[in-house]
Image (cartoon, rainbow, N blue to C red):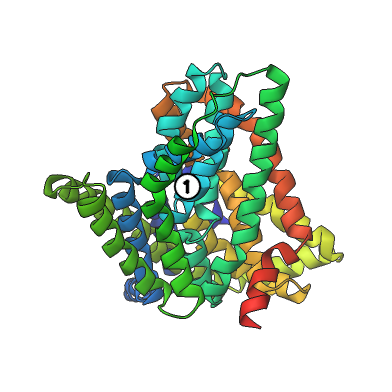
Amino acid sequence: MITIFIFLVLLLISTPIAAALGLTSIYAVLQAGNSLDNVARTMFAGIDSFSLMAIPFFIFAGDLMLAGGTSKRLIEMARKLVGWTTGGLPIAGVISSMFFAALSGSSPATVAAIGGVMIPSLRDSGYSGRFSVGLMCAAGSLGIIIPPSITLLVYGVIAEVSISELFMAGVIPGLFIGLSLIVVSYYIAKKEGHTPDKKPHFKEVAAAVKNAVWGIFMPLIVLGGIYFGIFTPTEAAVVAIVYSLLIGFFIYRELNLKTLFAVTKRSVVIASMVMLVISSAKVFSWYLTMEQIPNQIASTILEVAENPVLVILLITAVLLVVGMFMDPSAAVLVMAPLFLPMVMEIGISPVHFGIIMIVNLAIGMLTPPFGLNLFVAAGISDLPLTNVIKGTLPFVLVLITALLVITFAPSLSTYLPSMIYD
């Protein structure tokens, strides 16, 4: 209990998550009679994985696609395709976020790339500031659900589950959540009487699709290569980098050596932070396993709630709270070893639980006090954080409803993997 208390105190005083996990882990390991040598070895072992090499590569590929002009072309294509319908502009924002999620694998990156353009456009078209930031925050959460998701990749490594299967499992839930946001956007636009854009000519639509087609091809190449066994997720991430460089330099011509240096520097910093979080969380997970805490928690929950439905609802409630305080990748590293044995005992597959966990943590990115999407949206919209939080609340309810459907309709997650891998 003292270890958990120290960890929560460090989080509450705004200690970086990697430092909070690392300091807590060091204290716990020393109290258990182990040496700092074991801490260092475990931290190194935590990131000594071929699969985890995909994380910095996907981060770099997403940054290259953003700097290379892909996001604005995707937005323009979506606006031409659906902007002339009722609720067309917010629907275009959701569709653009879905496309960019399949390029970046990151929720904050999706909010920044798509929200930076769409939030001002929505407000100029008469939508309220709260609605605009709330919708784009929620749509940005798709960044860690729709593959290739960095958080799903981390879960696959920890749970020892096929990353290809997890990526396939995330497709339908991601599309379902996107569709839910589209339906809500349509309803609000119709209720408030918003005027759609003028219907474009066919040539304008064709031109927008042509300009964006290189960005559309990237997830098809990357995910298609993974699903058909042409290359591993790590190799796919490298292919994504090469593809991003080619279209950035030679097709869109918005990349240059100066921009490439800045993008590389930013990606290295972000990737280093993520890997430090992973290595620190690995020590924390090692300590929990050494103290048999997962078994104790599992026994306690199963004693309190023997019904499988109550068990998964209780786990969901815990994950929603954890998501409010922790980065998704760190939360996966800490919580997956706790809950996996339990959910497998009540008949939930590791693949399905991976999607349940990631959707829970995606919702956490929209909720205070530490929802990262909130801070990104506040920064790009110049709205007070309190207004951003109020704007996201209706969409949090939408996402929780979608989460319950995904939880209790496992075929949404398991259908595609079973078709290809069984």
Is 98 on the left-hand or right-hand side of 29?
right
Is 70 on the left-hand or right-hand side of 176?
left
Can you say which quadrant of the picture contains the C terminus?
bottom right
Most extreme residue toward the right is 307
Is 393 on the left-hand or right-hand side of 199?
right
User: Image point 76% across, 63% down: which residue?
Assistant: 301
Q: Quadrant of residue 56?
A: bottom left
Q: Which residue is mark 1?
A: 107
Q: Does residue 13 appear anywhere in the picture?
A: no
Residue 10 position in % (x across, y down): 45, 46
Residue 55 position in % (x across, y down): 37, 63
Q: Quadrant of residue 114?
A: top left
- Is 373 in front, or is 212? 212
> 35 above or below 208?
below
Residue 126 position in % (x across, y down): 55, 16
Can you say which quadrant of the picture contains the N terminus?
bottom right
Callout 1: SS: helix
